[in-house]
C-alpha cells in the first residue's frame, strides 16, 4: 500500500487576491475547512499516513493550523521554499524521505479521487513504469498540458501549454500522480523544473514508460474565485460535507 503523499502547496495565489493576502490559496476554506484539510482526510481514508508539504506564501498559517498532523492521525513534514523550484523541484527536495512509490497532488485543487482504486490500476502497469497520472480526453485544454497516448494508455508525446495548434485525441493532464522515486533522478538539482513542462517530456522522450489513469471521480482546480464557488456549489448540491469525507 502507498502510504505517502506529496501535496504541492507553493503557489502564490495571485488570482485569488485579496483572499490570499493573509493565507495561501491552499488554506482557503471550502465548507468551513481549508482545502488542504479535505485533501488530507481523503488520502487518509485510503491508507496514506505520511504527508510532505512544500510552503511558500504565508507558510506559518498552514504550519500553525496543521502542526505535525497528529490531530488528524497522520504525520506531516513541511518544507519552506524562499524561492519556488517548480513542482518537480519541490518533490525532489523531499527525495531522501520518500518511499519507492508515493502519491503527488497539486495542492490548489480539491480531489475526491478514490486513491485505492487508482493504486489497484497502477499495480497492473508494467514493472518498469515510472509513474501514472490522472488524465481526461477533451478538446478543452487551452489552460492545461496535454498528452498523446497509445491504446494501453502509455504516454507517446507531451505538449505543454501554451498551445499553438490542436491535437487529435488530446488528453488533459490533471494534477494527481503516482510516482516511483526513480523518476526524481531525472530532476536536475538547483534549477526551476516543472512536472508537466519539463520532467515528463524528458522521461517520455528518453523512452521511459509513463501511463495515464482515467476515472470519473470529482476534482477541480482552485485558482480563481469562480472555480472556488463552483466547488462549493458542487459539494452543496450533492450534500458532500467535510465530515462525511473525513468519516469515509
Image (spheres, grey):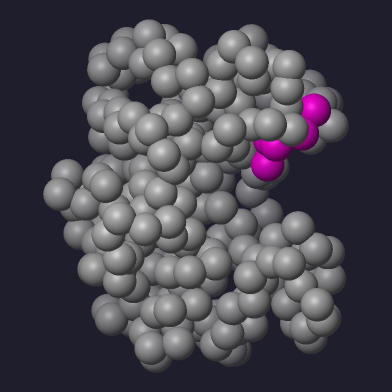
Q: Residue at x 40, y 14 (%)?
A: 60
Q: Position of residue 102 (x, y in %)?
A: 31, 52
Q: Say which of 21 and 50 sits in front.
A: 21
Q: Say which of 159 and 5 sits in front.
A: 159
Q: Position of residue 202 (x, y in %)?
A: 43, 79
Q: Check residue 224 for magenta coloring.
A: yes
In this picture, is 178 found above or below 123? above
Q: Position of residue 211 (x, y in %)?
A: 48, 75
Q: Position of residue 192 (x, y in %)?
A: 43, 56
Where residue 158 sits, quadrant-wise, is bottom right
Q: Residue at x 48, y 46 (%)?
A: 105
In the picture as drawn, the residue positioned furthest to the left comes out as 96
The magenta region covers: 221-225
Q: Residue at x 32, y 65 (%)?
A: 187
Where residue 122 sits, quadrant-wise, is bottom left
Left or right of 138, for residue 203: left
Amino acid at each position: 500500500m502507498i502510504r505517502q503523499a506529496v501535496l504541492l502547496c507553493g503557489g502564490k495565489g495571485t488570482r485569488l487576491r485579496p483572499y490570499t493576502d493573509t493565507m495561501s490559496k491552499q488554506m482557503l476554506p471550502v465548507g468551513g475547512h481549508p482545502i488542504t484539510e479535505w485533501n488530507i482526510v481523503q488520502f487518509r481514508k485510503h491508507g496514506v499516513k505520511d504527508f510532505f508539504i512544500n510552503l511558500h506564501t504565508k507558510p506559518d498559517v498552514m504550519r500553525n493550523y496543521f502542526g505535525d498532523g497528529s490531530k488528524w492521525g497522520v504525520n506531516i513534514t513541511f518544507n519552506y521554499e524562499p524561492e519556488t523550484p517548480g513542482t518537480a523541484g519541490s518533490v525532489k527536495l523531499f527525495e531522501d524521505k520518500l518511499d519507492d512509490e508515493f502519491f503527488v497532488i497539486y495542492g490548489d485543487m480539491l480531489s475526491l479521487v478514490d486513491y485505492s482504486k487508482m493504486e489497484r490500476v497502477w499495480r497492473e502497469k508494467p514493472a518498469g513504469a515510472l509513474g501514472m497520472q490522472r488524465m481526461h480526453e477533451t478538446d478543452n485544454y487551452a489552460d492545461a498540458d496535454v498528452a498523446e497516448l497509445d491504446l494501453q494508455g502509455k504516454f507517446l508525446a507531451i505538449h505543454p501549454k501554451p498551445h499553438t495548434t490542436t491535437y487529435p485525441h488530446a488528453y488533459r493532464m490533471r494534477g494527481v500522480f503516482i510516482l516511483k522515486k526513480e523518476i526524481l533522478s531525472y530532476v536536475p538539482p538547483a534549477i526551476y523544473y516543472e512536472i508537466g513542462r519539463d520532467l515528463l517530456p524528458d522521461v517520455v522522450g528518453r523512452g521511459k514508460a509513463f501511463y495515464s489513469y482515467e476515472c470519473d471521480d470529482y476534482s477541480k482546480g482552485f485558482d480563481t474565485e469562480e472555480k472556488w464557488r463552483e466547488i462549493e456549489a458542487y459539494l452543496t448540491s450533492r450534500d458532500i460535507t467535510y465530515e462525511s469525507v473525513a468519516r469515509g
